[in-house]
Image: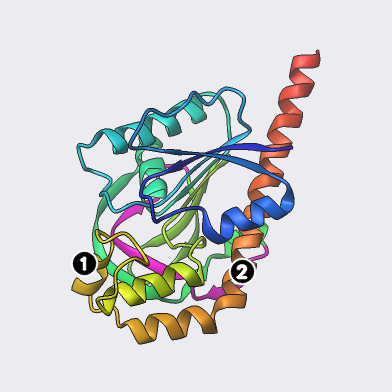
Amino acid sequence: MIRLLVVQNDPDKGFGRVGDALHRIGAVAATHMSSGDLPAVDGYDGVVVLPGLADPGDDEEAVHRGRATIAAALGAGLPVLGICLGGQLLAQVLGGETYRSATEVGYLTVETTDAAVDDPLFGGVPRRFTPFHAHAYAFRSPPGATVLARTAACDQAFRHGETWGIQFHPETTISFATGLANGLRGVPGGVDGATVPFFAANGLHPDTLEADAHRLDSEATRVAATIAAGFVARCLDRRSQAARVGGR
């Protein structure tokens, strides 16, 4: 059984499709909010840091906690998966840069690189796919990293050792998209009220959002399942290696 430490940054931005896929595989995710103290990484097989409304340069305790947990995981040799804000924090810890990028919101096409073909997480992902996006900041892939996916705006995924940073949102569910669409229509309750203004300010239309979420449902499920399975496999491999070393 794989045990994952999951750092969640906003109440309405959970593990979604990726979490569902991990559950089906048999992984156990212990989710902790970055608004409070985070546990030590001891006893976990991998760490996942989720998206959030915060910017990677914000001087907020929650941001500092997420970054510190990533650094601790790297120090312990654990695989790390960072999504959106989580990917940006991972890039920072690895010596990369984050910057204010062109804003990308809604469902937009991503293209993988040639290097993605042999990657443990992205090898089974389509060469072109259309995930959800929600960012005004991005990462420059850190030194020594391999870029796995891009849009015209920015790098969308990288690998550095046993860590992966992702800018797009493989976790987004139809229920989140529906809740956000209702929020854009002025109907409260679907997502946190703080989430809606960013999308409203960037012109995301609720009807388009809902239609794209349903149209791309099957593809989104496949991409999330592929990433989840690859990450669990790397966590299993790391644990096996640690057991062999410990048994010598």
230 is within the stretch colored magenta: no
> Which contiguous range is marked in magenta?
124-144
Find numbered disc 1 in the image and state the secondary structure of the residue it sits on: helix
32 shown above or below 75: below
Which kind of residue does numbered mark 2 sit on?
A: Thr
Residues packed near mark 2 inside 10 Å, few (<14), some (14 to 19) or many (20 plus)? some
User: In the image, 116: left or right of 208?
Assistant: right
Q: Which residue is mark 1?
A: 197
Question: What's the residue at 62%, 24% (across, down)?
Answer: 43
Residues packed near mark 1 inside 10 Å, few (<14), some (14 to 19) or many (20 plus)? few
Q: Quadrant of residue 101?
A: bottom left
Question: What's the residue at 73%, 51% (across, down)?
Answer: 25
Q: Position of residue 183 (x, y in %)?
A: 30, 72
In the rendered image, the quadrant that contains the N terminus is top right
Q: Position of residue 214 (x, y in %)?
A: 52, 81
Residue reaching furthest to the top? 248
User: In the image, 234: left or right of 109?
Assistant: right
* Circle on res. 221: 2
CB within 8 Å, label 2 to label 1: no
